[in-house]
Image (cartoon, rainbow, N blue to C red):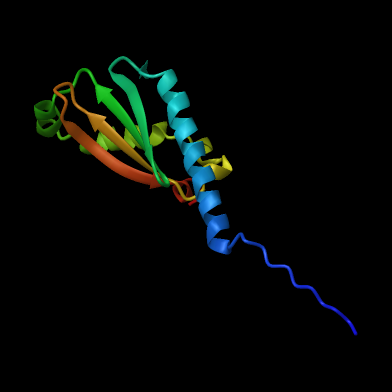
Amino acid sequence: MNLCTVLFTSCTISEKENEETEKLYRALEYQAASLNNVLPQKLDLNTHFDSVGFGSNQLRYYYSLSNLSEKDFLERELRDSLYAEAVDRIPCTLWRPVYMQGVEVTFNYYSSDGKRILHFVRQGEACYQ
């Protein structure tokens, strides 16, 4: 008589996915905390990189412009030029780490009077088009 033993593990696929998701979330949390430890930083004469926030599959970058009020921004129709400058500043190396795959990065720019004047979202795929 042959005896066959079947062993079932208690770890289901969804538990493994949850563990992986938690690991990626912790990596984003660490990334944000590491950056915030060295922020704010002056990027140029008038632009400051202020802080980073994070969420599930998301990083949020916050910048401020010391020389530009919301009124000036709107009157001078600077959205396109600020957007182009902001996009040029994004390094594609941002998405190199494994934990950054599929992460949405939001860029927020604020005027000297604290108004959000530019907001856009990027994912790593934008670097490879």
Residue 115 relative to residue 94: left or right:
left
Residue 9 relative to residue 108: left or right:
right
Q: Residue at x 51, y 48 (%)?
A: 101
Q: Residue furthest right?
A: 1
On the image, the x and y values in percent for residue 120 come to 30, 43
| Up/down of 48 relative to 94, above or below | above
**Is there any visible trace of residue 78 in the rendered image?**
no
Q: Residue at x 34, y 23 (%)?
A: 49
| Up/down of 36 relative to 80, above or below | above
Q: Quadrant of residue 33?
A: top left
On the image, the x and y values in percent for residue 74 come to 12, 33
Q: Residue at x 49, y 38 (%)?
A: 26
| Up/down of 127 relative to 1, above or below | above
Q: Nearer the viewer, residue 20 or 54?
A: 20
On the image, the x and y values in percent for residue 25 come to 47, 42
Residue 7 relative to residue 76: left or right:
right
On the image, the x and y values in percent for residue 7 come to 73, 68
Task: Please identify the quadrant where the N terminus is shown.
Answer: bottom right
Q: Residue furthest front?
A: 1
